[in-house]
Image: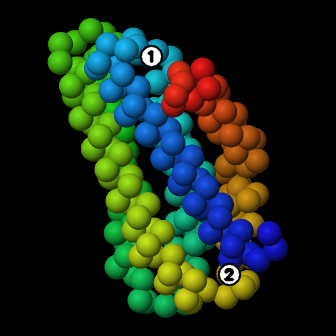
Amino acid sequence: MSDPQARAIGTIRAEHRALAAVINNMKAILADVRSGQMTLDYRLFWSMVYYIDAFPDRLHHPKEDDYLFARVKQRTHEADALIAELMSQHHNEAHALGQIRRWLGNHEAGVARSLDELERVVKDYAEFTWKHMRMEENDFMPLAEQHLTTEDWEAIASAFHDNADPLIGREASQHFASLFRDIVDKTPAPYGLG
């Protein structure tokens, strides 16, 4: 795909889909645990929590903030309020993930009713994430497509493809790709390949 806009948007959407897949699997696994169809594989679930925490925070959101949002801000003020809301959501995500870690730890420790709370906080996080991704894809992206230049899209596509942020580097990208494959391989069918 040679068009930088299509490459950048395709990568962003692919990263959204990978994150959504892990979150959907978390919800499905908890439903199966609730129904007695399986016991919770804590090691697998903790790796899923690590993925949904670290991947957006270290790779995805910094590139959106530093490249995509920054370039749009240079070209128009039409998206300023939307960008401020999306960046606020990026920062507020830590609290939601902290609740997931809290209730997963409580469930692993055998605390009463912790499965109820774990299901609730995962559901809340999923709804927060779907809303966020819909805002980015349905509300923000059309503005980006309208205002950004080919040069802007080249920079954004390069940042997402090469993980241009010097604090991250290619090794981190490979780490998360490997972790995602490991999650898919170990997640029981029909949610994964395990």
Q: Which residue is the site of mark 2? A: 152
In this orientation, which residue lies closer to the viewer: 146 or 151? 146
Task: Give amino acid for label 2.
Answer: Asp
Picture quadrant of residue 183: top right
User: Element type at marker 1?
Assistant: helix
Going by the image, does 167 lie left or right of 158?
Answer: left
Q: Is residue 191 left or right of residue 105?
A: right
Where is 102 relative to 162, above or below?
A: above
Q: Earlier in the sequence, mark 2 or mark 1?
A: 1
Q: Is residue 120 above or below residue 17?
A: above
Instruction: Identify the secondary structure beneath mark 2.
Output: helix
Residue found at the far right of this picture? 2
Apparent side of residue 110 relative to residue 129 in the rendered image (left or right)? left
**Residue drawn where x is 70% and y is 45% of the image:** 173
Residue that badge 1 annotates:
42
**Amino acid carrying mark 1 in the image:** Tyr
Query: Which residue is outermost to the top?
Result: 110
Whether residue 102 appears in this view of the structure is no
Quarter the C terminus occupies? top right
Q: Is residue 95 shown above or below 129? A: above
**Could you tell me how far apart the alpha carbons at marks 2 and 1 are, in whole angstroms?**
43 Å
Residue 146 in percent (x, y) is at 55, 89
Q: Are marks 2 and 1 in contact (CB under 8 Å)?
A: no
In front: mark 2 or mark 1?
1
The image position of residue 16, as x and y in percent, is 53, 54
Which residue lies at the image location 36% right of the left edge and 22% below the top edge? 32
